Amino acid sequence: MNERQLSAGAQQQSNAVGGAAQSGVGPGADRGARGRADVNSVVRELFSGETRVERKRFFFDLRENTRGRFLRIMEEVGGRKDAVMIPATGLERFMDVLERTIQANIDAGPPPAAERQIE
């Protein structure tokens, strides 16, 4: 059985159990205009969260497809969307660098007045 047949079988199984997984067909099919899906890919969303920082929105989606599990971080600002994909095998290393970056920001003290946001 080839990869295309495996993907089609997984989609049929997903549809049979209530359509929990989504099949992508064309750009953004798996989640509206956000993202791009492979025609042969079955995407399952394991976690989704979002936050707003200043004028940007960030979406965090932990997903799984036939190629593996990954975190997609998408930034949306002024109608423009950019995304980065991080394989699940690298999430702990990613978090380690992020924690060190946060600590470096704290250690640097308050930002210059030009960078401060009045909320």
Image (cartoon, rainbow, N blue to C red):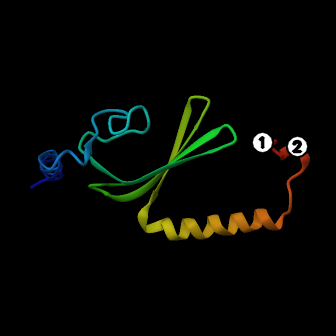
* Residue at the image position 33 percent from the left and 39 percent from the top: 30
Q: Which residue is mark 1?
A: 119
* Residue at the image position 81 percent from the left and 68 percent from the top: 107
Q: How far, Cα to Cα, is label 1 from label 2? A: 14 Å
Spot occupied by residue 16 in the image (x, y as percentages of width and height): 11, 47
Q: Mark 1: which amino acid?
A: Glu
Question: Most extreme residue toward the top, as rendered?
Answer: 79
Judged from the image, the secondary structure of the residue bearing numbered disc 1 is: loop
* Residue at the image position 17 percent from the left and 46 percent from the top: 18
- Please state if 93 lies on the left or on the right of 114 as rendered: left
Q: Nearer the viewer, residue 2 or 6?
A: 6
- Please state if 95 lies on the left or on the right of 109 as rendered: left
Spot occupied by residue 23 in the image (x, y as percentages of width and height): 25, 42
Residue 114 is tagged as: 2
Q: Residues within 10 Å of mark 1 (few under 14, many from 20)?
A: few
Q: Nearer the viewer, residue 80 or 59?
A: 59
Spot occupied by residue 52 in the image (x, y as percentages of width and height): 62, 44
